[in-house]
Amino acid sequence: MVARPSPALKRSEKPDCRFAAARVWSNYVNDWSKCPEVERQAAKMSGAWVFLGTRVPVKALFENLEDGATVDEFLEWFPGVGRRQVEAVLEFAAASLEPSPLG
């Protein structure tokens, strides 16, 4: 009997933290004003949250990750955005999922 490779998983079946990051954006309301690497101005991109000093919406990061892009690809496609900005946004999104201490 010849061993056959297992069939490829459908994209939706692959365990991938990028999909979790995208769900943070779409399913959880964050107070993005507390993230120092983003800004929002009514006259800039219709008031959407964008990476500081750019016109690149933060939502674009999560949408690209959800579609399977890597952070490196995102940075290549959006050269105005810095790696530190992306890391800060992802860290902020991850921290927002942590339970708040009861007090």
Image: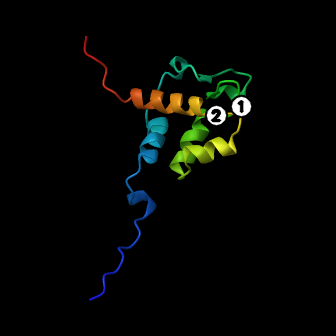
Judged from this view, the residue extending furthest toward the top is: 103
Q: Quadrant of the C terminus?
A: top left
Figure label count: 2
The 10 Å Cα crowd at callout 2, few under 14, some 14 to 19, many 20 or more, is some
Residue located at (36% from left, 76% from top) = 5
| Amino acid on which disc 1 is placed | Arg
Q: Is residue 70 above or below residue 99?
A: below
Q: Nearer the viewer, residue 58 or 1?
A: 1
For the question of whether residue 29 can be seen, the reply is no
Residue located at (53% from left, 21% from top) = 35
| Amino acid on which disc 2 is placed | Pro
Residue located at (66% from left, 33% from top) = 81
Q: Is residue 30 left or right of residue 69?
A: left
Residue 95 in picture, x, y percent from top left: 40, 27
Residue holding disc 1 = 55
Judged from this view, the residue extending furthest toward the right is: 43
Please, what secondary structure does the residue beneath circle 2 have?
Answer: loop
Q: Quadrant of the N terminus?
A: bottom left
Q: Is residue 24 above or below residue 99?
A: below
Q: Is residue 28 left or right of residue 61?
A: left
For the question of whether residue 88 can be seen, the reply is yes
Q: Which mark is residue 103?
A: none
Q: Is residue 9 above or below residue 29?
A: below
Judged from this view, the residue extending furthest toward the bottom is: 1
Q: CA distance from mark 2 to mark 1?
A: 6 Å
Residue located at (59% from left, 23% from top) = 37
Residue 67 in picture, x, y percent from top left: 54, 52
Please, what secondary structure does the residue beneath circle 1 have?
Answer: loop
Residue holding disc 2 = 57
Disc 2 + disc 1, Cβ < 8 Å: yes
Residue 45 in picture, x, y percent from top left: 71, 30
Q: How is the image coloured?
A: rainbow
